[in-house]
Structure formats: structure tokens, C-alpha cells
Image (cartoon, grey):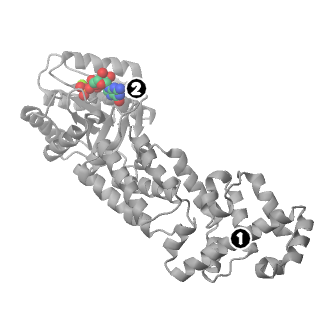
């Protein structure tokens, strides 16, 4: 199971809280293995993971989320890009607009023809489905049953053994009856063979469809890729329909096919029922392949609520060894805005260390806040002036113990030391990760 594998891959990072060459390398290797296991072509998987590695090492960990989450996010972005970025609609031009359905036998063409008919009907179009599978009489009945079910007319000539003739007659019939869209279901073979290719080629040339869709069973793995390539060489189709993506089916085929034929995937089919059809969205598929939707939305939430200017300001202060209690408080506020504190703790540099041993929830911040708020503005800005006498006053003022105040001062001091160390080292990136 791909998502489990990726989960494991990301886990190696999750605990550590730092992005370094070493742990990125091992995670990237895991991601690559997982993608290959999901039928993503080896070369493609290597390309993706190389990009992920470069992206991860180049990004500033300070203001972003924890490294593990960051890698998830980068991986999702890369997979989305690989699958074309955004959705691509089918073209419906001509009167009638003709959509030609091609693919191997059993790939799900007839089922998809019904689904597409239903979808177009719901969009308010007048649709005619055409049964051009001249080899299997049962295929005509199959389409007729589907047509009845969805309330869309089916054109068939059971005695006619010439697919092109049937299709031409169907188009004439569509014009006569005012049907604006014609979906032509065709015959497939169990494997690519020349006669089938010639037939479908001939149909395409003669009908000049505004959209030729190649239907492929996503469960056939690497074969799906090879079949797609062969069909594309002969047909130059406009888009791909991935079927049988229900349940546990791997989505890796989507990445490989897109990469190899460079044609958009337009629909995915997720079951035998007429309503099991979805427009293909690359980002959703990437999410599905990663199987980590919750993590991704968490990252997005974090990015939204983190005020960028504030983050920049804090960043600058850290660089000038100027980080004080006001900044600390402001970072606490930022984290609180984001909601689920436990998950988001990794976001503040040094915070992971400072908070060690605490069971963190909203209330965990209260003592710290209380202590900081009992400091005078001058004390917050120049923490070095806080001596024993001041600590006693702050403890009394905040209702906390001296020990608690001392602990916070010590933790804050540790944070600042780490920040200083990092500034000395120059490379902010490595240093930041060291702090986390
Ligand atoms: P065709 O030979 O290409 O026309 O394929 P069919 O449309 O007849 O489908 C072959 C088989 O796959 C049928 O039993 C369909 O019910 C089934 N099928 C088609 N699409 C899907 C799908 O998305 N999920 C599942 N589980 N079965 C499907
Ligand atoms: Mg069929």
C-alpha cells in the first residue's frame, strides 16, 4: 500500500524536526521506492524525487512548517505538476460534437460511455450514444441498458457490421433529431492488434471528433502505459480516462501515463455505477497518491495563518541576536491562531526544545504568557536585565513560582544561544534545522 509506505517515509523525518542532506536523502529514497511500487515508471519516479530533494533543501525551514510536513507538501506539488497542474475540460465543438471512445476490451469503454452520457445530460445537453462495437452483440444490449437507466437515447444497428457506416448514420440521425452531442462507443480487443487500430483510426479520420478519449484500466499497471503509448501513436488522442480507480487501486498509472504520452487525464472512473465518474483534478490525485490529506491541509492552514511580515521581522531579529520576550509572545500568538497547537509546535525555532516535557495544549501557554506579561516592557526587550530581584517580582505578579520563572528564563536563554550559534555559522538553513 503506497500511502502506508509514504507514511513510513515521512515518519523518518517527522520525529527529527530537521531537514538535512542525510535525512532528506533517505526519505527521498523511500518516496521513490513507494512511487515505483505504485507503478510509476522508474525514470519518472527518479525525476520527481530529485526535484523534491532540491526543493526541500532550498526552502527556508524557519518560517515554514516542520520538515516532514514540508516534504509532504513539496511532494504533493511535484506530483500535481507532473499530472498537468490543473484540470483540462473536454472540447465539444461541431454540430453535433462527436466524442470518440477508444481502448482495449474490458477497459471500461461502454461503462464510461454511459457515464459520460449521464454527465452531459445533467449539464443540459441533448446526447446520443452510439453502439459501434460490431463484434459483441452483448455490447449493444449493455449500452442500451445503460441508456435506459440514465434516460439517454442509444443508436444501434445490430445487423450492420460496418462501424463507420453505423457512426455516420448515427450522426445523420443526431442532426435530424437535434442531438448536439454524440458519444461513439467502439470495439476493443484484449490486446493491441493491427486490425483494431486500423478500425479506430479510420473512424477517427472519418468522423473528425472534437474529442477522442482513450480509456484505460488503471489496474493494469505498466501495461496501461504501453497501451496508452501505442494508441497515442496511432490515434493522437486528446485525453485519457482512467478506470477502476475504486477502492485500493494505485494512482501511479496517472503519473506514468501523463509523463509518457503527455496528454491530459480528463476523467477517472471509480466504480461500476453510473454516478462513479469524476473529472480529473491533478491536485486531488496527488493527494490521493500521497494518502495524507490531513497533513496537507494542516500545512496549508499553517501557511495561511502565519503572518508573513511578522515572520520576516522575527527572522531579522534572530539574525541580529535581538530576539526578545515580545517576539516570543508574538510567536506564541501566531501559533495559537492556528488552532491545533500540538501539531504546530514544531514551527517555532527552538520551541521544540523549550517546550520539552510539557504536555502541550492551549492551556500550556498560559503560565508562560502570564510570566511574560508580568515583565515590564523594558524587561521584555532586554531580557538580560532580569536579575533575581526582578524574577521574584515577576513570579509574584504572575502568580507563578520562582522555579517556573527560572525555567522559562533558562529555556529562553537556551533558545537565544542556539540562535546566536546559528548566526555565527552563517548558513541560516542548517542552523535553523539544528535548532528545531
Ligand atoms: P469495455 O469492454 O471497454 O466496453 O468495458 P466495459 O465497460 O464493458 O467494462 C468491463 C467491466 O469493467 C464491466 O464489468 C464493468 O462493470 C467494469 N467496470 C468499468 N468501469 C469500472 C470502474 O471504474 N470500476 C470497476 N470496479 N469496474 C468497472
Ligand atoms: Mg464495450
Residue 211 placement (x, y as % from top left): 27, 43
Q: In the rendered structure, which disc, 1 or 2, sits on the residue that comes first in sequence?
A: 2
Residue drawn 11% across the image and 38% down it? 202
* Crowd band around label 2 with a 10 angstrom C-alpha radius: few (<14), some (14–19), many (20+): many
Which residue is under mark 1? 412
Residue drawn 57% across the image and 68% down it? 435
Dividing the picture into quarters, in which one does residue 104 lie? top left
> Mark on residue 274?
2
Residue drawn 21% across the image and 34% down it? 103
Dividing the picture into quarters, in which one does residue 125 lie? top left
Residue 413 placement (x, y as % from top left): 70, 73
Give the quarter the ligand 1 occupies. Answer: top left
Does any portion of residue 62 appear in the rendered image? no
Secondary structure under the numbered disc 2 in the rendered image? loop
Q: Is mark 2 within 8 Å of ligand 1?
A: no
Q: Nearer the viewer, residue 199 or 419?
A: 419
Q: Which quadrant of the figure contains the C terminus?
A: bottom right
Q: Which quadrant of the figure contains the N terminus?
A: top left
* Crowd band around label 1 with a 10 angstrom C-alpha radius: few (<14), some (14–19), many (20+): many
Q: Nearer the viewer, residue 238 or 3?
A: 3
Q: CA distance from mark 1 to mark 2?
A: 61 Å
Secondary structure under the numbered disc 1 in the rendered image? helix
Instruction: Tell how many labels.
Output: 2
Tell whether 50 sits left or right of 408: left
Amino acid at each position: 500500500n503506497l500511502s502506508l509506505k509514504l507514511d513510513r517515509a515521512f515518519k523518518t523525518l517527522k520525529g527529527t524536526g530537521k531537514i538535512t542532506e542525510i535525512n532528506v536523502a533517505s526519505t527521498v529514497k523511500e518516496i521513490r521506492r513507494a512511487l515505483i511500487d505504485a507503478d510509476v515508471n522508474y525514470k519518472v519516479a527518479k525525476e520527481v524525487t530529485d526535484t523534491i530533494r532540491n526543493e526541500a533543501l532550498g526552502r527556508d525551514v524557519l518560517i515554514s512548517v516542520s520538515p516532514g510536513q514540508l516534504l509532504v507538501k513539496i511532494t504533493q506539488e511535484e506530483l500535481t505538476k507532473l499530472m498537468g497542474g490543473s484540470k483540462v475540460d473536454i472540447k465539444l465543438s461541431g454540430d453535433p460534437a462527436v466524442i470518440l471512445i477508444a481502448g482495449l476490451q474490458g477497459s471500461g469503454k461502454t461503462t464510461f460511455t454511459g457515464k459520460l452520457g449521464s454527465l452531459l445530460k445533467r449539464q443540459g445537453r441533448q446526447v446520443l450514444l452510439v453502439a459501434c462495437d460490431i463484434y459483441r452483440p452483448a455490447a449493444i444490449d449493455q449500452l442500451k441498458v445503460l441508456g435506459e437507466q440514465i434516460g439517454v437515447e442509444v443508436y444501434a444497428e445490430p445487423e450492420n457490421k460496418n462501424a463507420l457506416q453505423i457512426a455516420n448514420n448515427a450522426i445523420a440521425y443526431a442532426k435530424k433529431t437535434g442531438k448536439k452531442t454524440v458519444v461513439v462507443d467502439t470495439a476493443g480487443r484484449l490486446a493491441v492488434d493491427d486490425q483494431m487500430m486500423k478500425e479506430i483510426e479510420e473512424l477517427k479520420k472519418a468522423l473528425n471528433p472534437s474529442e477522442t478519449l482513450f480509456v484505460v484500466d488503471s489496474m493494469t499497471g505498466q501495461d496501461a502505459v504501453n497501451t496508452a503509448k501505442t494508441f497515442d501513436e496511432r490515434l493522437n488522442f486528446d485525453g485519457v480516462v482512467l478506470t477502476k480507480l475504486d477502492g485500493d487501486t494505485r494512482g501511479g498509472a496517472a503519473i506514468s501515463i501523463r509523463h509518457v504520452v503527455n496528454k491530459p487525464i480528463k476523467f477517472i472512473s471509480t466504480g461500476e455505477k453510473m454516478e462513479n465518474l469524476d473529472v480529473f483534478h491533478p491536485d486531488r490525485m496527488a493527494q490521493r497518491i500521497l494518502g495524507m490529506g490531513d497533513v496537507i491541509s494542516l500545512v496549508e492552514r499553517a501557511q495561511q495563518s502565519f503572518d508573513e511580515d511578522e515572520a520576516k521581522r522575527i527572522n531579522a531579529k534572530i539574525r541580529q541576536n535581538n530576539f526578545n520576550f515580545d517576539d516570543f509572545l508574538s510567536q506564541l500568538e501566531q501559533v495559537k491562531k492556528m488552532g491545533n497547537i500540538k501539531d504546530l509546535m514544531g514551527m517555532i525555532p527552538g520551541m521544540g526544545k523549550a517546550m520539552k516535557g510539557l504536555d502541550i495544549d492551549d492551556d500550556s501557554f498560559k503560565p508562560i504568557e502570564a510570566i511574560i506579561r508580568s515583565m515590564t516592557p523594558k524587561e521584555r526587550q532586554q531580557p538580560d536585565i532580569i536579575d533575581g530581584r526582578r524574577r521574584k517580582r515577576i513570579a509574584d505578579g504572575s502568580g507563578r513560582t520562582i522555579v517556573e520563572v527560572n525555567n522559562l528564563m533558562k529555556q529562553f536563554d537556551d533558545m537565544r544561544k542556539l540562535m546566536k550559534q546559528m548566526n555565527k555559522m552563517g548558513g541560516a538553513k542548517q542552523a535553523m534545522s539544528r535548532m528545531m
